[in-house]
Amino acid sequence: MVVLVVVMMMVLMEIMVVMVVVIVVVMMVIVVVMVVLVVLVEMVLVMVVVVMMVIIMVVVMMVVAMIVVMVILVVVVMAVNR
């Protein structure tokens, strides 16, 4: 009987240790996955911000080019009218 009880206790202890190890591994995996997801989301956000900046720059350049062309046309028209 005593041997059975000792064996049961050993088995319970091993099961507890295995459970703890599994829980720790699962927690670590969850943490790693969260970190990877955060990094990916940050990379995507950075890419979106960069794309938005490039689009804004292109739009600004196009607006500036349009204004410059309009000014040149006005100047040319004024010179021709003179």
Image (cartoon, rainbow, N blue to C red):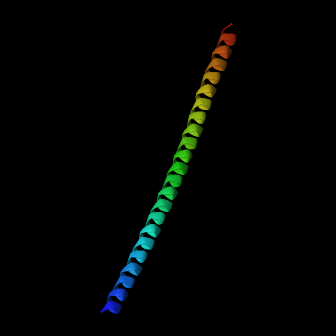
**Residue nearest the observer in this picture, 78 or 34:** 34
Residue 74, position as x, y percentages in the image? 63, 15
Image point (30%, 92%), residue name: 1
Residue 25, position as x, y percentages in the image? 47, 69
Image point (35%, 92%), residue name: 3
- Image position of 73 with respect to 1: above or below: above
Image point (50%, 53%), residue name: 38
Residue closest to the far front: 2
Residue closest to the far left: 1
Q: Quadrant of residue 55?
A: top right
Quarter of the image with the C terminus in it: top right
Residue 7, position as x, y percentages in the image? 37, 88
**Residue nearest the observer in this picture, 33 or 43:** 33
**Residue nearest the observer in this picture, 38 or 46:** 38
The number of numbered discs placed on residues in the rendered structure image is: 0
Q: Quadrant of residue 65?
A: top right
Residue 35, position as x, y percentages in the image? 51, 56
**Residue nearest the observer in this picture, 63 or 34:** 34
- Image position of 11 with respect to 63: above or below: below
Image point (39%, 84%), residue name: 10
- Image position of 74 with respect to 48: above or below: above
